[in-house]
Image (tube, helix red, strand yellow):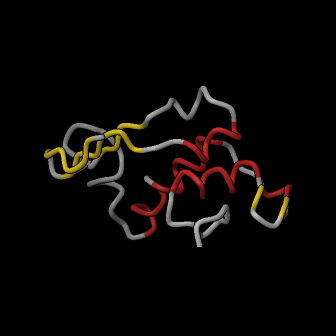
Amino acid sequence: MTGIYLGNIDPFKAMYATVTRQSDMGIFEPQEAITVRDALRMWTIWPAKAVGEDKIKSSIEVGKFTDMTVLSDNIFQITKDSLKDVKASMTVVGGRVVYQK
């Protein structure tokens, strides 16, 4: 399955779905739309917080373990409809570049 839906493994398509409430089947539960900032938190800080690891990872801060992805676009400046087209340009894990476009 590669379409637009909440459980999509592509984080940018999933973020698009949570922000716009659009899916392959049309609009769903529009009253549950969230901000781009909260959609980003769903993929970063909130999972770490859910398992009690937010004090040691999940955000870029001195003293924390943080993996990082550089995006093709600034998700706070593009249109909501463009979120589904964002790509990873580079990924850093454990201080090493593990992916670079």
For the residue pair 23 and 40, the one nearer the viewer reads as: 23
> Is residue 45 positioned above or below 81 on the image?
below
Q: Quarter of the image containing the C terminus?
A: top left
> Is residue 18 positioned above or below 52 on the image?
above
Q: Taking 68 as reference, is 72 left or right?
A: right
Q: Taking 85 as reference, is 30 left or right?
A: right
Q: Residue 8: x percent and y percent?
A: 57, 66
Q: Residue at x 75, y 64 (%)?
A: 24
For the residue pair 85 and 17, the one nearer the viewer reads as: 85
Q: Residue furthest top?
A: 77
Q: Residue 73: x percent and y percent?
A: 49, 31
Q: Residue at x 45, y 68 (%)?
A: 50
Q: Count numbered badges in the picture.
A: 0
Q: Quarter of the image containing the N terminus?
A: bottom right
Q: Residue at x 79, y 58 (%)?
A: 32
Q: Taking 33 as reference, is 54 left or right?
A: left
Q: Residue 95: x percent and y percent?
A: 14, 45
Q: In terms of image quadrants, where is residue 23?
A: bottom right
For the residue pair 14 and 38, the one nearer the viewer reads as: 14
Q: Residue 4: x percent and y percent?
A: 67, 61
Q: Residue at x 55, y 35 (%)?
A: 75
